[in-house]
Amino acid sequence: MNNLLKLSESTSLALHMMVLLAEDTRRFHTTEEIANAISGSRHHLSKVIQRLVTEGLIVSKSGPAGGVMLERPPEDISFLDIIEALEGKFLEQDCFLGRKVCRAKKCILGNLGHQLFKKTRETLINTKLSNFIPANHKKKSKPRKEK
């Protein structure tokens, strides 16, 4: 098994970008600046940004002083919020192996799949952007809404 939780490249870009934005919530960050900082494609990042704006996680401002910034404080945005914005709802699967129908009357794996889903969801909900901000940055991070 390569990954327990498969995330798209778009979601990976979004997670990295959102942590970067959480480090300095006082100003707008340009797409180019973010792409350079996270070593991502500017064009791909632009599509990710559109999705995050639509989902209300970031705000966008055009013009010379424009860019993007968080819509809410970093402690109010969970990794689950970001993942669901790009991947869709994090739905529980009935089968740990991804099967539609189990041949056994009772799953031989018991409720392992449910336990993993529950713990993963709980971890993603409790993992906030603020968890990744170094202590010296937290003093600087004051959300500012400017549209």
Image (cartoon, rainbow, N blue to C red):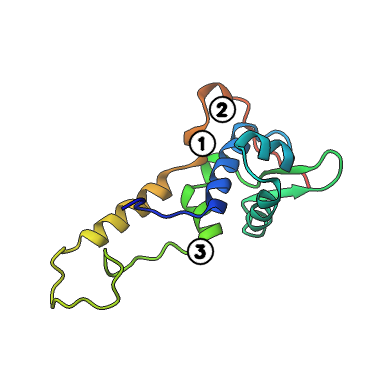
Residue type for callout 2: Lys
Q: Residues within 10 Å of mark 3 (few under 14, many from 20)?
A: few
Label 3's element? Answer: loop
**Badge number at residue 147:** none
**Front label number (1 vs 3):** 3
How many numbered marks have been drawn onto this rendered protein structure? 3
Reading the chain from its start, which is encountered first: label 3 or label 2? 3
User: Separation of disc 3 and disc 2 at Cα?
Assistant: 30 Å
**Badge number at residue 130:** 1
Horizontal and vertical percent for residue 75? 52, 40
Horizontal and vertical percent for residue 134? 51, 26
Q: Which residue is mark 3?
A: 88
Residue type for callout 1: Ser
Q: Nearer the viewer, residue 9 or 60?
A: 9
Is 36 left or right of 113, judged from the image as shown? right
**Front label number (3 vs 2):** 3
- Quadrant of the rendered image containing residue 36: top right
Horizontal and vertical percent for residue 84? 50, 58
Residue at position x 66%, y 35% in the image:
25
Is 46 left or right of 8, judged from the image as shown? right
- Quadrant of the rendered image containing residue 94: bottom left
Q: Residues within 10 Å of mark 2 (few under 14, many from 20)?
A: some
Residue type for callout 3: Gly
Label 2's element? Answer: helix
User: Separation of disc 1 and disc 3 at Cα?
Assistant: 23 Å
> Furthest residue to the top?
136
Q: Are marks 2 and 1 in contact (CB under 8 Å)?
A: yes
Reading the chain from its start, which is encountered first: label 1 or label 3? 3
Residue at position x 16%, y 70% in the image:
107
Residue at position x 19%, y 63% in the image:
111
Q: Which residue is mark 2?
A: 138
